[in-house]
């Protein structure tokens, strides 16, 4: 469209623009520019170069759904020093672009040997522009970081500097319907580009769109705006070119009016947009975005897991399913998502055959859970992560019917499943006989599958041991996927009930730090005692399964005794002592997290806090200052701790002698100290045997599920020597 009010200069002036976009979507950006009649283009990395007039520049700003910024380079020069940057900027004819009364902002990107940080580059640029105008008129532009009249971009790449006017003024993914600060992991222009890549567009012939994990509704809103032919820039209030000296306000206004008239009537659209998400926060954000975009009557979103939602699907008409499911930022997260991706794949195959399905993920292993051969994939960057957008045609020739019919495991997974089933047959019978709800069913029995798997009722808690450096990380990751994929069928456990963690050497407070915020707690029972366990939020669950026989020993010997539990963790041993009839228990640990957990375990078992006390303290310091006597002491210290809460570093091999002597000083004449630790190379100080009677009871403290791993812990009963009469 060319307007009569446009000046001759506006028509004849050709602007060489650089229009940036998300990596991987350059072709999509070029195609949409061509659709608007902007044909003089050339592809670059993360950008399309466009030669056009002022009207074409405005069209690119107003209509591009994929563009991030529209840049107008005004100078490019080589630099050999910081002064060269100043001189090059000052040499630009700035009076052609702004006045001394304008506000400006400088964005600097890139560094080199001369410009070593972007702030310095921005300051030198600002100084050069200010000095240019001072020399010209005695005045200088002022700096305004938020929405300046003119935003200037400085790009430094090796020894070349490019100075540009940022005509958009801010990132063009901001359409105006999303409130800043809201949940927005997927930017609007990336969502629009992926929709176009999937075949969605104005008059595309598709009449249904479903996002089964819609989050804040970005795909849905962008698809609806596209179908209604609503310009993505129509709602934006701020543009960088509005303060630019060459801006033609009348031309821009006419293009805006034309865009408003292009909008289709929603009532005649005949397209259904549906989305679900299981998170209340996500659906609330989606509804707000939909409302602000004016699409409330067009898009339907529901807070429901997609597996349970009754979508309105017309199987006679073509449609698109598009989704950006969770990727799993940590290794354990990835494993728990296997079930989600499998459910998603099974859902599209069973509900929308004949449709297209596009999925964005950073995890290739998870993408393989979709039982359809992808037609193609596009590499993009989302939130700083390298991702791929997979396009799956849900058609007979692409669906892996054998995978749909049954869960086909890899050879490695089959081998692992066979071992699990063999182990489970052995341990399940033993656990049922002894009323044991939590036990270890696998512990790196096969070296290539270096995981420990514990059963907590109907849940599986998986810990992957840190692989040696000689093992290829990708191979280790594949083996972990094999192991986890085998667990549900081999152990008859729901896929969603498999929790995976990566276990490595812990130091200081790392062992206490949260891994998650799920607050996923459950209550388990052991020999008449109840315990709160948390399978997701911490590295450890709150219950050391290998100490089950030790706790039973404590329960059997605690009647009428004053019991002291040092390094108490969650005070499970204290609960057993109380259940065994202990007169009192006293539990000490330096962790706020675990002492609070300990109090909850004691309260759960209805023991009086007056007789069963918990104290947060450094056990070393507590033993040195406390003078009370106890009839029964349990001490299971960590191998190493350098926590700031401790007065000194604890090394159990070096310090155990002093620790045992301090504890024995608090032990009554005929009392017993149970000392245990899990340092696999631990050697008890021989000198202790000359001072005390010591029995190694390690073998007696290993139940069936741990007897194949005799180094899981070592345990001694220590008593005072009897004085000869």
Image (cartoon, rainbow, N blue to C red):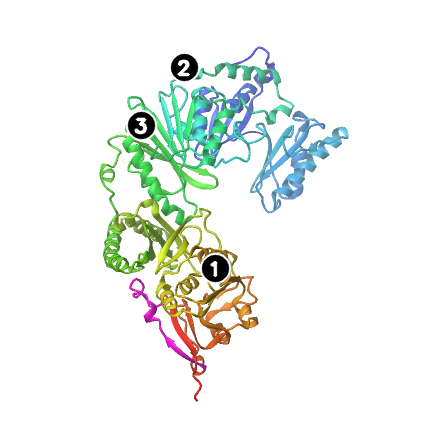
Image position of 171 with respect to 384: above or below: above
Q: Which mark is residue 355?
A: 3
Q: Left or right: 474 with respect to 7?
A: left
**Location of residue 309 in the rendering, given as x and y in whole percent from the top left corner:** 35, 31
Callout 1 secondary element:
loop
**Location of residue 110 in the rendering, given as x and y in whole percent from the top left corner:** 57, 41
The residue identified by callout 2 is 268
The residue identified by callout 1 is 608
- CA gap, disc 2 to disc 1? 70 Å
Dot 2 and dot 1 residues touching (CB under 8 Å): no
Image-quadrant location for residue 361: top left
Image-quadrant location for residue 679: bottom left
Residue 223 covered by magenta stretch: no
Q: Residue at x 24, y 44 (%)?
A: 408
Look at the image and tell me whether residue 539 can be seen.
no
Neighbour tally class for label 2: few under 14, some 14-19, many 20 plus, Cα within 10 Å: few
- CA gap, disc 1 to disc 3? 63 Å
The mark lying in front, picked from 1 and 3, is 1
Dot 1 and dot 3 residues touching (CB under 8 Å): no
Image position of 261 with respect to 245: above or below: above
**Location of residue 265 in the rendering, given as x and y in whole percent from the top left corner:** 45, 15
Residue at the right extreme?
A: 138
Q: Left or right: 9 with respect to 287?
A: right
Residue 697 covered by magenta stretch: yes
Look at the image and tell me whether residue 445 can be seen.
yes
The mark lying in front, picked from 2 and 1, is 1
Q: Which region shows up in magenta?
A: 691-711
Sequence-first tag of 2 and 1: 2
């Amino acid at each position: 469209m060319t307007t009569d009010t446009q000046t001759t200069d506006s028509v004849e002036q050709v602007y060489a623009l650089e229009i940036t976009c998300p990596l991987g979507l350059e072709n999509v950006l070029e195609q949409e520019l061509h659709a608007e009649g902007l044909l003089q283009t050339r592809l670059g990395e993360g950008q399309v170069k466009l030669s056009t007039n002022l009207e074409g520049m405005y069209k690119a700003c107003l209509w591009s759904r994929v563009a991030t910024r529209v840049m107008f380079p005004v100078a490019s020069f080589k630099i050999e020093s910081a002064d060269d940057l100043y001189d090059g900027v000052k040499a630009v004819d700035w009076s052609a672009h702004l006045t001394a009364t304008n506000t400006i902002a400088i964005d600097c990107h890139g560094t080199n040997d001369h410009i070593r940080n972007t702030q310095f580059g921005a300051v030198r640029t600002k100084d050069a522009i200010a000095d240019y105008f001072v020399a010209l008129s005695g005045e200088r532009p002022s700096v305004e970081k938020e929405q300046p009249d003119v935003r200037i971009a400085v790009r430094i790449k090796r020894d070349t500097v490019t100075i540009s006017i940022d005509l958009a003024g801010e990132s063009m993914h901001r359409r105006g319907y999303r409130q800043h600060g809201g949940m927005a992991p997927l930017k609007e222009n990336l969502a629009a580009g992926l929709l176009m890549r999937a075949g969605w567009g104005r008059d595309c012939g598709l009449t249904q769109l479903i996002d089964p994990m819609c989050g804040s509704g970005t795909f849905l809103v962008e698809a609806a705006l596209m179908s209604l032919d609503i310009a993505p820039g129509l709602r934006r209030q701020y543009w960088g070119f509005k303060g630019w000296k060459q801006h033609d306000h009348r031309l821009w206004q006419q293009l805006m009016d034309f865009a408003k008239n292009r909008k289709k009537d929603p009532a005649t659209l005949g397209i259904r947009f549906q989305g679900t998400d299981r998170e209340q926060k996500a659906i609330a954000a989606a509804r707000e975005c939909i409302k602000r975009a004016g699409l409330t009557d067009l898009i339907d979103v529901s807070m429901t897991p997609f597996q349970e939602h009754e979508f309105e699907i017309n199987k006679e008409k073509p449609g698109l399913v598009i989704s950006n499911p969770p990727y799993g930022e940590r290794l354990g997260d990835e494993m728990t998502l296997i079930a989600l991706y499998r459910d998603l794949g099974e859902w599209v195959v069973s509900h929308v055959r004949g449709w297209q399905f596009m999925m964005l993920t950073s995890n290739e292993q998870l993408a393989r859970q979709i039982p359809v051969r992808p037609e193609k994939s596009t590499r993009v960057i989302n939130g700083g992560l390298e991702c791929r957008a997979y396009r799956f045609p849900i058609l007979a020739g692409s669906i892996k019917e054998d995978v749909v019919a049954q869960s086909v495991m890899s050879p490695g997974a089959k081998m692992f499943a066979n071992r699990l089933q063999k182990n489970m047959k052995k341990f399940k019978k033993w656990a049922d006989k002894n009323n044991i709800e939590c036990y270890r069913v696998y512990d790196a029995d096969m070296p290539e599958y270096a995981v420990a798997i514990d059963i907590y009722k109907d849940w599986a808690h998986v810990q992957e041991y840190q692989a040696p450096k000689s093992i290829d990380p990708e191979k280790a990751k594949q083996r972990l996927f094999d192991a986890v994929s085998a667990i549900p069928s081999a152990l008859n456990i729901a896929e969603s009930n498999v929790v995976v963690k990566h276990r490595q050497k812990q130091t200081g407070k790392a062992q206490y730090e949260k891994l998650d915020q799920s607050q996923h707690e459950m209550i388990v029972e052991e020999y008449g005692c109840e315990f709160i366990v948390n399978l997701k939020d911490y590295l450890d669950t709150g219950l050391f399964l290998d100490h089950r026989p030790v706790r039973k020993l404590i329960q059997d010997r605690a009647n009428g005794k004053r019991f002291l539990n040092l390094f108490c963790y969650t005070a499970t041993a204290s609960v057993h002592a109380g259940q065994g009839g202990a007169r009192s228990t006293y539990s000490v640990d330096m962790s706020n997290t675990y002492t609070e957990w300990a109090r909850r375990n004691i309260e759960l078992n209805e023991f009086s806090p007056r007789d069963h006390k918990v104290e947060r303290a450094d056990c070393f310091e507590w033993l040195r200052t406390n003078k009370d006597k106890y009839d029964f002491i349990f001490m299971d210290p960590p191998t190493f701790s350098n926590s700031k809460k401790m007065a000194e570093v604890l090394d159990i091999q070096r310090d155990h002698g002093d620790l045992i002597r301090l504890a024995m000083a608090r032990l009554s004449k005929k009392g017993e100290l149970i000392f245990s630790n899990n340092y696999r190379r631990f050697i008890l100080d021989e000198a202790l045997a000359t001072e005390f009677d010591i029995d190694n009871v390690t073998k007696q403290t290993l139940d069936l599920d741990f007897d194949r791993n005799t180094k899981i812990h070592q345990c001694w009963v220590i008593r005072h020597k009897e004085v000869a009469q």
